[in-house]
């Protein structure tokens, strides 16, 4: 599913720990190369994975869904290829077998203030039964309400 198209598509939809304001090393590295950040959403359902050393969201993209997942579109100004390789590793995507991990990076339609844009996104690639669906599809709001 991963192709070399990212040389022309420099937009990435993020909905979890890579959004602006998160301070993990991957988010910080990513945001050093980001020019513009726009609020955005995709169709689908957001689930919470809590059997890890921290909670993180899992997006199940579905263009026919009545639900939305809220996030941001990041316009990457430089180091795009290098950043996506680093983020692929963070998301558990192996270059040898990119379709084998929990996530896959795909180009999908994203709703923004400018209309529908095609952006890269890390979306679910494995069964997600047993995970809790996040009502409202907003990971940032979920974390804020936990405090």
Image (cartoon, rainbow, N blue to C red):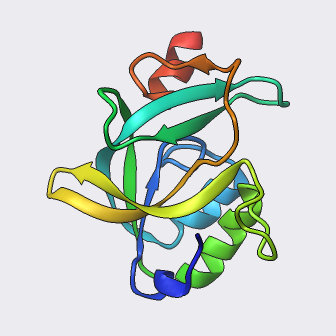
Q: Is residue 147 visible?
A: no
Residue 13 figure quarter:
bottom left
| Residue 2 higher or lower than 103, as above or below | below
In the shown orientation, is residue 114 left or right of residue 45? Answer: left
In the shown orientation, is residue 107 left or right of residue 41? Answer: right
Kindly identify the residue that appears in the image at 38 percent across and 49 percent down. Answer: 72
Q: Percent position (x, y) of residue 66?
A: 29, 27
Kindly identify the residue that appears in the image at 62 percent across and 74 percent down. Answer: 83
> How many circles with numbers are drawn on the protein?
0
Q: Percent position (x, y) of residue 99?
A: 70, 62
Q: Percent position (x, y) of residue 4?
A: 55, 86
| Residue 141 higher or lower than 16, as above or below | above
- 87 or 122: which is nearer to us? 122
Quadrant of the image containing the C terminus? top right
Kindly identify the residue that appears in the image at 58 percent across and 70 percent down. Answer: 1
Kindly identify the residue that appears in the image at 14 percent across and 58 percent down. Answer: 114
In the shown orientation, is residue 27 left or right of residue 138? Answer: right
Q: Is residue 20 visible?
A: yes
Residue 97 figure quarter:
bottom right
Name the residue at the left extreme: 114
Residue 75 figure quarter:
bottom left
């Amino acid at each position: 599913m991963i192709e070399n198209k990212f040389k022309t598509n420099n937009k990435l939809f993020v909905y979890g720990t890579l959004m602006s304001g998160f301070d993990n090393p991957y988010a910080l590295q990513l945001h050093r190369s980001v020019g513009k950040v726009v609020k955005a959403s995709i169709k689908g359902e957001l689930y919470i994975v809590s059997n890890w050393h921290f909670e993180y969201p899992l997006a199940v993209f579905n263009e026919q869904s009545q639900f939305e997942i809220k996030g941001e579109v990041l316009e990457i100004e430089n180091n795009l290829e290098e950043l996506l390789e680093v983020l692929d590793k963070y998301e558990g995507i192996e270059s040898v077998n990119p379709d084998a991990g929990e996530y896959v990076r795909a180009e999908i339609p994203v709703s923004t203030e400018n209309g529908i844009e095609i952006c890269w996104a890390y979306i679910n690639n494995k069964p997600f039964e047993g995970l809790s669906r996040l009502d409202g599809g907003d990971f940032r709001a979920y974390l804020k309400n936990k405090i």
